[in-house]
Amino acid sequence: MTRFILLATFLILEGHVSAHVGAWHKGMYCMRGNKAGDDDRNTNAAFQPMYNLTKAQWWFHAINDCDKFPPDAGNFLELPANGDFTVEHAVNRVFTNLVSDPVLGTYVDGQEHPGLGTTSDGKQPGSDSSTPVHTQNESMASGTAFAISYQSEIPDVTPENLVVFSVLYNTPWKRIAKYSVPDLPPCPAAGCICAFGWIPNGCGEPTLYMQGFRCTVTGSKTNPVRTIKYPAVAPQWCQDNSAQCVTGPKQMIYWQQAEGNNVVVSGNDKYGFPKFPVYNMNMGFPNGTLTMYALGDSRTLLTGDYDIRRPNNNILELAPIGIHLATPFHLRCTRQYVFYKPSISPNMRSKTTNAGHCTASVYSRNSAELSSLSSIRLSASNIKCVPCHRQ
């Protein structure tokens, strides 16, 4: 009889039983548990699996009030822009560095498990839904994701402003997990809200894991500043046709709930197994950082024909002249003439081609300011206008 060497025993330590995996960090909600005044070293309240719940129940794990137990003041999950951060994947707080005298191991249950993922005769085992990672080996672990919202309180977070920024394939499996971070813009002074999530890939019940964090971004570039593209779009199954993969900012996967789902799959995948929407390329999620922002002129907010003039050496204007805005802008000309060069007359109000008229697109970090304007005054030091060549 084949003997599976698997993480198949429910964990019994200090009188507590657990079999589900979450991401642990001092910036997490519900780190000490979900009972007021208690500091439960054996808690796993933040990542009990969720199935067939209302959105009010599953959103940030409100089903057991975990959204009401924020981290201690000053504790944030720090996200170094263009760097990485580390969390601990574990089935219980006691298997992490967030308690005194922890029980630490290579795997999520504080154990070492030599030969985990193989049978006694060296073959791959079948799926075992009793394992806390819901998979048969590391290569088939479904993948986990972190998302960020530039809101400072959970009630202000929506699926559309909670954007996936990092995915880690072949997790959860081992305790230590390192996630990469794109060049995120800085958070508000009160911090951002982040979320961790994953969905088991065919081993076990089709459940949803979602837990909250207070987070902040460190080391962001100040020039140019990144702009998150909103709204985030629900991902969709695209295993059979990569052209159907959602590009740009994506929502987390919300699935198998009574309401609030953003993903529907049916039938089998190309290998003949039931489809499970998880964080991999089947759903359009690459490993590592995700495209979720615009740089400078990659988001059009106003487009049209404008008369352009330079009344003095420091100011460039789009006529008719309106409000002066201090926020840095970028102007991209798209046809006819180079926007500014010494040979062009300082007064460029005429729409004739020899006066320097061109079609322009204006971009800003502050879309609300731009949306109501019919004209804009721009500081010359903040202008980029290339190319605008004669046709």
Image: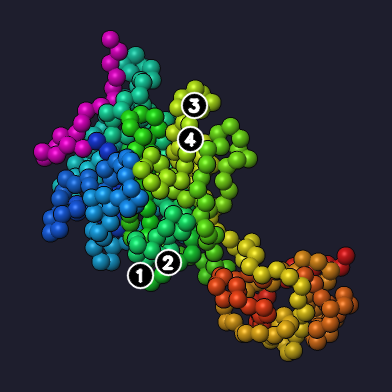
Outermost residue, left side: 15
User: Disc 1 versus disc 2: distance between alpha carbons?
Assistant: 8 Å
Residue beneath disc 2: 187
Q: In which quarter of the image is the C terminus?
A: bottom right
> Which residue: 62% across, 66% down?
296
Residue beneath disc 1: 190
User: Disc 3 versus disc 1: distance between alpha carbons?
Assistant: 45 Å
Q: Where on the picture, by quarter, is residue 188?
A: bottom left
Residue in front for this viewpoint, 77 or 234: 234
Tag 1 and tag 4, C-beta contact below 8 Å:
no
Residue beneath disc 3: 268
Residue beneath disc 4: 265
Of labels 2 and 4, earlier in sequence is 2
Of labels 3 and 1, earlier in sequence is 1
Above or below, 320 relative to 353: below
> Magenta region: which residues?
1-18
Residue 45 colored in magenta in the image: no
Residue 216 seen in render: no
Tag 3 and tag 4, C-beta contact below 8 Å:
no
The answer to whether residue 215 is left or right of residue 378 is left
Residue 27 seen in render: yes
Residue 10 colored in magenta in the image: yes
User: Disc 2 versus disc 4: distance between alpha carbons?
Assistant: 35 Å
Q: Where residue 83 sits: x, y (%)?
A: 45, 55
Q: Residues within 10 Å of mark 1 (few under 14, many from 20)?
A: some
> Which residue: 28% across, 34% down?
132
User: Disc 3 versus disc 2: distance between alpha carbons?
Assistant: 41 Å
Above or below, 125 relative to 312: above
Residue type for callout 2: Cys
Q: Where residue 380 sits: x, y (%)?
A: 68, 81
